[in-house]
Amino acid sequence: MRTLYVEGRSVLHRMPPRAKLLGLATASIVLFATRSIPLLGMFCVASAAVYLLPRLAPREAFERLRPVLLTIVVVGLFTLLFDSAIEAAVFVLRLTSLMLLAAAVTATTGISAFMEEITRLAMPLERIGLVRAADIGLAVGLVIRFVPEVLARTQAIRDAHHARGLKPRMLTLAVPMIILTLGSADEIAAAIDARGLRGQN
């Protein structure tokens, strides 16, 4: 099965998961606290440099970002049409920086480490009765784990269209993708319940 994690010995690989998550959270706060385009531009360049640390192959590095990048571009164009160029630039630079940093973190942190760290960080909320820390860790782990699976299925559906001489369209891609994803969600939920992972005390 595919995973977002990439084996390596880069600086990011050696950093503790908590440091990476707290760094990502801090970067998010800084990005949304400023509207300076030069500062956001420098932040974006620095984020790209961080993303290059795991030394991914160029094609793989781009494929990991393409779905989110396309979304950012589309929403940025709508912002440009209905607001202003400055607002569009701020939006695109902020989200591109976050995308690059988040991709760097997921590429250098294993899923089990993610789940353990998220569970630990959520423990204070469990102590006051707001959430179940293990459930949050499990949810985050599942999301990270199945992102590459969704991308792979989307590509498989696109390839099937090409093989039949059909032009891929948003609707013809989305419908089978939703059906497959919902089917997988039911299977995962059944497996989780069978193992008693939800509702444990």
Image (cartoon, rainbow, N blue to C red):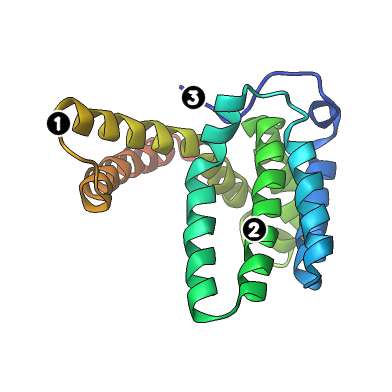
Q: For residue 154, which quarter of the picture?
A: top left
Question: Which element type, helix, strand or loop, lies under badge 1?
Answer: loop
* Dot placed on the residue nearer the N-terminal end, 1 or 2: 2
Residue occupying the point 28% across, 34% down: 158
Q: Amino acid at mark 1?
A: Gly
* Dot placed on the residue nearer the N-terminal end, 2 or 3: 3
- Between marks 1 and 3, how big is the CA–CA gap? 28 Å
- Residue wearing tag 2: 95
Viewer-nearest of discs 1 and 2: 1
Mark 2: few/some/many CA within 10 Å (<14, 14-19, 20+) = many
Q: Amino acid at mark 3?
A: Arg
Give the farthest residue toward the bottom.
83
* Dot placed on the residue nearer the N-terminal end, 1 or 3: 3
- Residue wearing tag 1: 165
Q: Is residue 147 above or below residue 136?
A: above
Question: Which element type, helix, strand or loop, lies under badge 2?
Answer: helix
Where residue 46 appears, as percent x and y from the top left, is 82, 45
Mark 1: few/some/many CA within 10 Å (<14, 14-19, 20+) = few
- Residues at marks 2 and 3 touching, judged by CB atoms closer than 8 Å: no
Which mark identifies residue 2?
A: 3
